[in-house]
Amino acid sequence: MNLFVIGNENGRSQERKNMAIVTLVGSGQMASALTFPLFENGYEVRLVGSPLDGDVIARLRQDNYHINLDRTLHDGVKYYTIDQLSEALDDAELVVCGVSSFGVDWFLESVFPVIRADVPVISVTKGMIDYPDGRLQVYPEYWAERMPEDHQIELFAIGGPCTARDLSDHDHSFVAYCGKDLEKLAWIREHFATDYYHIAITDDVVGLEAAVALKNGYALGTAIAIGMKNRCGDDGIAHVNSKAALFQQSVWEMDQLLGIVGGSHKMIMYAAGDLDVTVAGGRSRKVGQYLGEGFSMPEIEAKLAGQTLEAVVIATRTAKAVKAMAKAGRIKETDFPLLMHVDQCLNAGAKVNIPWHDFETVTRDAVK
C-alpha cells in the first residue's frame, strides 16, 4: 500500500487543458460540488442527472441553482438529462460516477456499457456489498468483477472527510483518491486539486473505500448520544463525553474491520475524519439522533420519508457480515458491541441501551 500527498498546482489555464471535458453522471450533492474545482481548473464540465434527478436538472438549467445542494453552480457548467447521456459522454476524457449506493447496479447496467473503454471512471459512491459467507466487497471491486472482460474500464474512487456544501463554499478539505494505477490517478488528481481541495493518492482501494463506507453506519451509532436528551446538564446543553466515547468506540471497531476486509490500518485516518463530519450533520446523524430520542425505526423512516438512508444499509450489511464470520468461527460478535447494538436497534426493535461495559471488556482484552 502506498500513500502519497502531492503539492497543489494552481492557475492551470484553460489553454493548457484545451478545454478538456469531464462528465459527471448523477447530479447528487457531492458530484455537483465537484463541479466547482473542475470548472475553476478550466475544464468543460458536463453534469448529467440520473433518472431521479429531473427536477434538479430542470432548475439548474434555469439559473444554476441546485435545489438539494442549496448552492448556485458556476455559470458555464452544462446540464444534461439521462436521455442525453451519450451526448454528454462524447469526447469526455474522464467520467465521475455521482450516484448514491442505491444506484450501483443501475450505473453498472446502464452507464458503464456506453463509456468508452479508454475513459477512466472515478466514483464518489460509498458503501459495500455483503455476502452470505461474511465477505464485504467495496464497490470498485464489485463493478470490476461484473464488467465484460472486453470492456474493463479503469476504476478509481474518492474518500475522506468532505461535505458537499463545504466543498462548494471552498472550505479547506483533505481527501484521498484511490486506484491501482498511481500514474493515472495522479493525472486524475490534477483535474480536481485546488488551493482549497487537497488530495492524497493511494493504491489501497479496499482500505480507503471500506473506511469511508463504514463511517456511515458508525456515524449513526455515534449520533445516538446527541439524541439522549436525558443526559443534558442543567443548562440544557448535551454533555459531550458520551458522544466522544461512542466516537472513540466507533474508531476502534472500524479499525478492526479494516484489518478483516484486507485494508491498511493507515486508512483509519480517513474513516475517523469522515466520521467527524458525518456526525456533525446529515441523514446519518438524524437517524442516530432520533434513535437516541427514543423513536422506533418505523417512526424514523416516516420522519425521513423520501431520503436515502445509506447509514442504515451499511450498518445492517456490516452487522450481517460480522454475524456470518462469527458463525464460521473467524471472529466474535462480542468484539463489535456498538455495531451489534446499532443493528438490534435498527432491525430488531431494540431500545437504545449503550453497552458501555462491553466497550471496556473488548478493548481491555485486546491489549493484553
Image (spheres, rainbow, N blue to C red):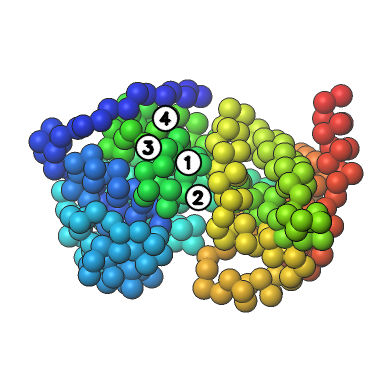
- Quadrant placement of the C terminus: top right
In the rendered structure, find residue 159 and report the number of the disc placed on it. Answer: 1
Q: Amino acid at mark 1?
A: Gly
In the rendered structure, find residue 12 and report the number of the disc placed on it. Answer: none
What's the CA distance linking mark 3 and mark 1?
A: 13 Å
- The residue carrying mark 2 is 126
Closer to us: 17 or 325: 17
Are dots 3 and 1 in contact, CB under 8 Å? Answer: no
Q: Amino acid at mark 2?
A: Lys
Residue 80: percent from left, percent from top: 23, 64
What's the CA distance linking mark 1 and mark 4?
A: 10 Å
First in residue order: circle 1 vs circle 4: 1
Closer to us: 200 or 157: 200
First in residue order: circle 3 vs circle 1: 1
- Crowd around label 4: few <14 · some 14–19 · many ≥20 (10 Å): many
- The residue carrying mark 3 is 197
Residue 243: percent from left, percent from top: 73, 47
Are dots 1 and 2 in contact, CB under 8 Å? Answer: yes
Q: Residue at x 37, y 67 (%)?
A: 67
What's the CA distance linking mark 4 and mark 2?
A: 17 Å
Depicted 304 relative to depicted 358: above or below: below
Q: Nearer the viewer, mark 3 or mark 1?
A: 3
Q: Amino acid at mark 3?
A: Tyr
First in residue order: circle 1 vs circle 2: 2
